[in-house]
Image: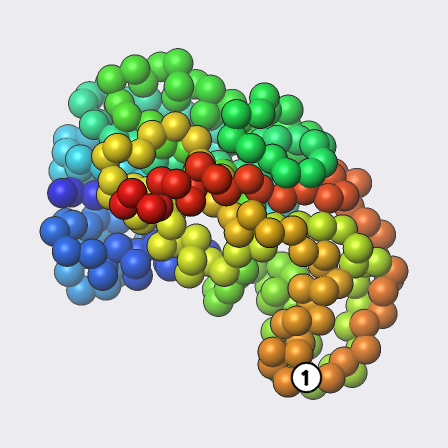
Amino acid sequence: MKLLLTGATGFIGRHVLTRLRECDGVEIGILTRRSNVAPVGVTEIVDDIGNEALDWHALGCPDVVLHLAWGGLPNYRSPRHFDEAQRHSTFLRRLAAQGLPRLICAGTCYEYGMRQGCLAEHEVTDPANSYGLGKDVLRRQLALDTPNTQLLWTRFFYLYGNGQAPTSLYSQVCAAIDRGDSVFRMSGGEQLRDFLPVTRAADHLVRLALDPRQTGIFNIASGEPISIRRLVETWFADAGHSIRLELGHYPYPDWEPFAFWASTAKLTAALART
């Protein structure tokens, strides 16, 4: 199987590439704008998805494209996400029209919008920020315009781990531990979220991507709600670091629901078959 990965140098992509290299029978290529970033045994194609000459044949006619590339993060409300949706749609629809058999794309839990509670894949999307809307637009365009390409869409909830942006909660906790801080400022911490280590998310994604029976939409998450306060306390405790939480220093975000997490019944059933 020939698989092309985009976004291989990003937070999720680096872990996905590591997991792919553990798989037998997979010829891996990456599409990147920077040269000399591919590890040994991985084919590197240096180009940009905005290049109209970049097509399925120029990419080596891969059997599978695992598309993780996306710009504009971690600013979820940037209007840039609308431009990203159009750029990625043009690129991916071109590959599909030229014969790409299978496409796996990264979506987001923000496609669900301001819904509370347990969120399942069959729910109607209603995004409330630019990032969620950009991803939802891309998914809808691909579903309509790539009828001959098998499409799998994955909605990531909250991932954490090495290589995450410095502004992320996990990275801020790690930085506080490294500095030996005695106080950690945060929101009230009672909001409920669904967190999953990025290494586990990468494993789930690779297993779905390499199984041609898996199509449609999948939540990639733990399926277990946890309060931000409890999560932060756990991270500090696991590191053996005693710290005082200054709760309520930051307001709760007004662009995401107070309590939401994923239904993972569909994911669990699919992984049991891979």
Asked if residue 261 is positioned above or below residue 143 in the image, the reply reads: below
Looking at the rendered image, the quarter that the N terminus falls into is: top left
Snapshot quadrant of residue 133: top right
Looking at the rendered image, the quarter that the C terminus falls into is: top left
* Label 1: how many Cα within 10 Å (few below 14, some 14–19, many 20+): some
Instruction: Say which amino acid is labelled 1.
Output: His
Asked if residue 199 is positioned above or below residue 101 in the image, the reply reads: below
Q: Is residue 12 left or right of residue 131?
A: left
How is the structure coloured here? rainbow
Q: Is residue 188 visible?
A: yes
Pointer 1 residue: 241
Snapshot quadrant of residue 236: bottom right
Q: Which residue is rendered at x = 16% and y = 50% of the image?
A: 26
Pinpoint residue 186: horizontal percent, then vertical percent: 79, 63
Q: Is residue 77 visible?
A: no
Pinpoint residue 161: horizontal percent, then vertical percent: 51, 64
Pinpoint residue 188: horizontal percent, then vertical percent: 84, 58
Q: Nearer the viewer, residue 93 or 143?
A: 143
Q: Is residue 49 left or right of residue 81?
A: left
